[in-house]
Every structure is written in structure tokens, then in C-alpha cells.
Image (cartoon, helix red, strand yellow):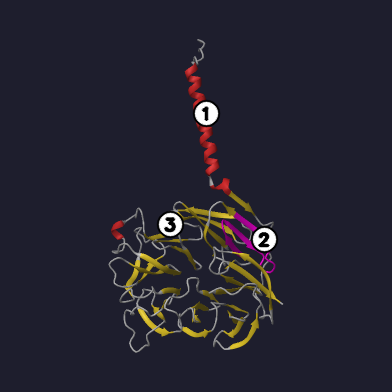
């Protein structure tokens, strides 16, 4: 067998090979330097957090236990056993009783918002970061340990808010909205969509601004205003694409006759209907026969058809930091003048409590609401005050104080800070 002579290597061949190696190495170094992993610090918990048991009674008094900066939350973000805060680019899971950091996750990007979702199943903390494409980088963390559970990235607005239920999360900005499942797979995208899958099936509306939204089951409700609309519109969509890969719309109708006032706010949704806070500055559509004008909770069925109106005390524009809190069969919402308490299923307002500072939550069968002097403890069914617990807040109360409960600990959000109070 003839011997094969080795291929002759000319100097130019060696130079080209060396150049290719250098370029590949440079690309690898650049990719590593710019990758999210390079700019991420994750400190996970040593183990699962101690389980939190429901309170058996409301303590006689509360004392301040700890506080933390959390400008990425509008209301306390609660997991099954931790309180999650977000500030700057850092997300932290705290022991609710002591405030001790159980885990942390940091990036060199600013947080848009932080929330908890699927607490009864996956128990995730969602950290949404801002980059050149808006609030587009989402990381899902185990709320108990801080371990990374998933991530997604897509086009997004520069500001978003999250609304959750047991099935889906809605991420809504001024021009674009998405839904996600617990695996962070997108259900629908709505509003500003760069490349719609089936543009012929898109709603026949253009240049719409989105103001508020919520989700229940497989339906999403959103208040929007489109270019050719004389008033604000309530639209109900399916949370996932239909069989033809299109966004299904259950109903969409104008709910104000003009835009002379601020937009109504979707505050709750159930399998029975939708509750919308309307400050009353713009005329309602359809007009409410025989009802007083002014702020009201307006009820719609799950297709967005008007079903009733209840007047309440409130401002024409509710405070920007006011978010609804749902627990134990009731939804609480602060209108700027009172906390309105709704039945979580029928969405009928049960009563309103004036003189409060924000929404609250149920502890041991009693409704706790933040007040100027502390905590008002009320009968859930009637709203009757049972007692008032003085509270020494370490800082003056912000325009909105949102109160949530984890075990026998009360957690309040005042502006960009979270403060926790335990039994005294």
C-alpha cells in the first residue's frame, strides 16, 4: 500500500488557522462576559423554610419586627412561608417572623416588578427585569429556596404590572399585554404585537392604550381606550390561544360615554363576573337608571355585559399604589376614601369602611385593615369593628398602606418599604 504523504502546511494556512482560533476564543469570551449568568448572583437557602401555620386568633398587640426596602412591589409579595422583596436589581426571600434573609437573587439590571404566583402549587417568585426591550426578562424562582425554576424573555413595555390567579399571570403594560402559565409559556399576546400569527383574526381596533387588567380561570379582563373610541372600553379575552392559534374575544364594549375623566379600574374577576371601580367623572355606558352619580363599583358578567352598579365613597382617580387583595372569600380595595369589601365570588360590595389607609386581609376569621392609629379588626361578614390595635410604625404611613398576613405576622407595604409586625 502506497504511503500517503502528509498535507503540506504553508505559512498562510497556519496564520489562517491561528486567526480562526483567536476569533472563536474572542467570541466565547464576549458571550460569557455579556451573558446573564456572568452578571447574576444567586444565594440559595440551605433548605426548605419552616412551614407557617395559620393564626388561631388575632394577637392582642403587634410590635415592629423588621423592615426592608422593596420598591419593586406595590403590595407585600407573600409565598407560602416567606416574604419576598425586590429593590434595585436584588430579590430577597425573608423569614416572615425575623426578616432574616433566607435567599437572594441579584442581577446588574433594574427590577420592573416582583410578585408571587401559584402559591398553592408551584409557589414561585417572579422577578421581572428591564433591559433595552422593556420589562422583558423574567426569572421564576422557588419562593421558599430561591432556586431558579425558569426564565422567559420577549418584547415588553417599559413598565408592567402583574395580576395572578391559580391558573395564569397577566403581565400588562400601557400598550402590550401577555399571559403566562406556571411554566412561563406564553398564552396570548395582545395590544402592540410586532408579528401577529394570524393578523386577520386580530380585534378590529387600532392603537389601544391598556390601563388595568385582571384574570380568573381562562379569561382576562382589560380596560382600554383605542384611537377611534369615544370612551373607555372593557374587553374580555381568553387567556390562551384558540384552536386556530388566534386570540379569542368573549366581549368588548364601551363602558363610558367619553374620556373626560380618568379610566375605570378592573379590580376583580371571578367565574361569575367582573368588578370595575369607576370614579364617576365620565358618564357611564350604559347609563345607570335611578342610581346616584359619582364613584361606584360597576359589575359586569364574564362577557363584559353590564350587570349592576353600587355607589361607594372614593376619589375620581384611585391612588396609583392601590391594588386589590383577595383572601378567604373577600376582595378588599381602597378607593382613596374607604376600603370597599366585595364578595369574592359574586363581586357584590358587602360594605365599605371609611377612614382606612388601604386594603387588608383576613387573619383567624377576622378582617384586618390598616388605619391611621394601627390595625382595625373587623367582623368579615358585617364590617363591624371588634377592636382597634395600636401600631407603632417606624415611619409615617404612605398615601397607601397595603396590609397582608402570613401566619400570625402582619406585613405592610408603605410606599417603597415593607414592614412586618409580630405578636407583642
Q: Secondary structure at mark 1?
A: helix
Q: Earlier in the sequence, mark 2 or mark 3?
A: 2
- Compared to residue 146, the image places residue 14 above or below, namely above
Q: Hey, which residue is sitting farthest top in the picture? A: 2
Q: Give neighbour class at mark 2: few <14, some 14-19, many 20+ (Cα, 10 Å).
A: some
76 on left or right of 211? right
Quadrant for the C terminus in the image: bottom right
Q: Main secondary structure of the magenta part?
A: strand
Q: Hey, which residue is sitting farthest right in the picture? A: 424
Asked whether 260 or 249 is in front, the reply is 260
Disc 3 to disc 1: CB gap under 8 Å: no
Q: Position of residue 366 (x, y in %)?
A: 60, 82
Residue holding disc 1: 21
Picture disc at residue 411: none
Disc 2 to disc 3: CB gap under 8 Å: no
Q: Give neighbour class at mark 3: few <14, some 14-19, many 20+ (Cα, 10 Å).
A: many
Q: Is residue 104 magenta?
A: yes
Q: Position of residue 114 (x, y in %)?
A: 54, 62
Q: Which residues are magenta?
A: 83-105
Asked whether 276 or 166 is in front, the reply is 276
Q: CA distance from mark 1 to mark 2?
A: 45 Å
- Compared to residue 170, the image places residue 295 above or below, namely below
Q: Give neighbour class at mark 1: few <14, some 14-19, many 20+ (Cα, 10 Å).
A: few
Q: Earlier in the sequence, mark 3 or mark 1?
A: 1
Picture disc at residue 101: 2
Residue drawn at x 61%, y 83% as measured from the top left:
377
Residue drawn at x 66%, y 70% as measured from the top left:
52
Image quarter for residue 172? Answer: bottom left
Residue holding disc 3: 156
Q: Earlier in the sequence, mark 1 or mark 2?
A: 1
Amino acid at each position: 500500500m502506497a504511503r500517503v504523504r502528509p498535507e503540506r502546511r504553508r505559512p498562510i494556512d497556519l496564520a489562517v488557522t491561528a486567526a480562526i482560533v483567536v476569533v472563536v476564543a474572542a467570541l466565547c469570551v464576549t458571550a460569557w462576559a455579556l451573558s446573564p449568568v456572568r452578571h447574576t448572583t444567586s444565594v440559595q437557602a440551605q433548605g426548605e423554610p419552616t412551614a407557617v401555620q395559620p393564626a388561631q386568633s388575632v394577637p392582642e398587640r403587634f410590635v415592629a419586627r423588621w423592615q426592608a426596602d422593596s420598591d419593586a412591589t406595590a403590595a407585600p409579595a407573600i409565598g407560602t412561608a416567606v416574604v419576598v422583596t425586590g429593590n434595585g436589581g436584588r430579590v430577597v426571600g425573608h423569614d416572615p417572623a425575623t426578616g432574616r434573609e433566607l435567599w437572594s437573587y441579584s442581577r446588574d439590571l433594574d427590577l420592573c416588578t416582583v410578585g408571587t404566583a401559584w402559591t398553592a402549587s408551584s409557589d414561585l417568585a417572579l422577578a421581572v427585569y428591564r433591559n433595552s426591550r422593556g420589562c422583558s426578562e423574567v426569572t421564576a424562582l422557588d419562593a421558599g429556596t430561591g432556586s431558579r425554576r425558569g426564565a422567559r424573555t420577549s418584547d415588553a413595555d417599559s413598565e408592567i404590572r402583574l395580576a395572578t390567579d391559580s391558573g395564569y399571570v397577566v403581565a400588562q403594560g400601557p400598550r402590550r399585554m401577555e399571559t403566562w402559565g406556571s411554566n412561563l409559556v406564553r398564552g396570548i399576546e395582545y395590544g402592540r404585537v410586532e408579528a401577529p400569527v394570524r393578523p386577520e383574526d386580530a380585534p378590529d381596533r387600532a392603537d389601544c392604550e391598556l390601563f388595568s387588567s385582571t384574570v380568573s380561570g381562562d379569561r382576562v379582563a382589560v380596560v382600554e381606550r383605542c384611537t377611534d373610541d369615544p370612551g373607555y372600553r372593557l374587553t374580555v379575552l381568553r387567556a390562551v390561544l384558540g384552536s386556530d392559534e388566534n386570540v379569542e374575544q368573549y366581549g368588548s364594549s364601551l363602558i363610558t360615554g367619553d374620556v373626560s375623566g380618568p379610566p375605570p379600574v378592573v379590580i376583580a374577576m371571578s367565574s361569575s363576573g367582573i368588578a370595575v371601580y369607576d370614579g364617576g367623572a365620565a358618564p357611564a355606558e350604559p347609563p345607570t337608571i335611578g342610581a346616584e352619580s359619582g364613584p361606584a363599583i360597576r359589575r359586569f358578567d364574564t362577557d363584559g355585559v353590564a350587570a349592576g352598579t353600587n355607589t361607594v365613597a372614593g376619589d375620581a382617580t384611585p391612588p396609583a399604589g392601590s391594588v386589590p387583595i383577595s383572601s378567604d372569600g373577600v376582595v378588599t380595595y381602597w378607593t382613596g376614601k374607604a376600603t370597599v369589601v366585595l364578595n369574592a365570588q359574586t363581586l357584590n360590595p358587602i360594605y365599605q369602611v371609611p377612614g382606612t389607609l388601604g386594603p387588608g386581609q383576613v387573619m383567624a376569621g377576622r378582617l384586618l385593615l390598616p388605619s391611621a392609629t394601627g390595625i382595625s379588626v373587623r367582623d368579615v361578614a358585617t364590617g363591624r369593628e371588634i377592636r382597634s390595635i395600636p401600631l407603632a410604625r417606624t415611619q409615617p404611613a404612605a398615601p397607601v398602606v397595603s396590609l397582608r398576613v402570613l401566619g400570625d405576622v402582619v406585613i405592610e407595604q408603605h410606599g417603597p418599604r415593607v414592614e412586618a409586625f409580630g405578636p407583642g
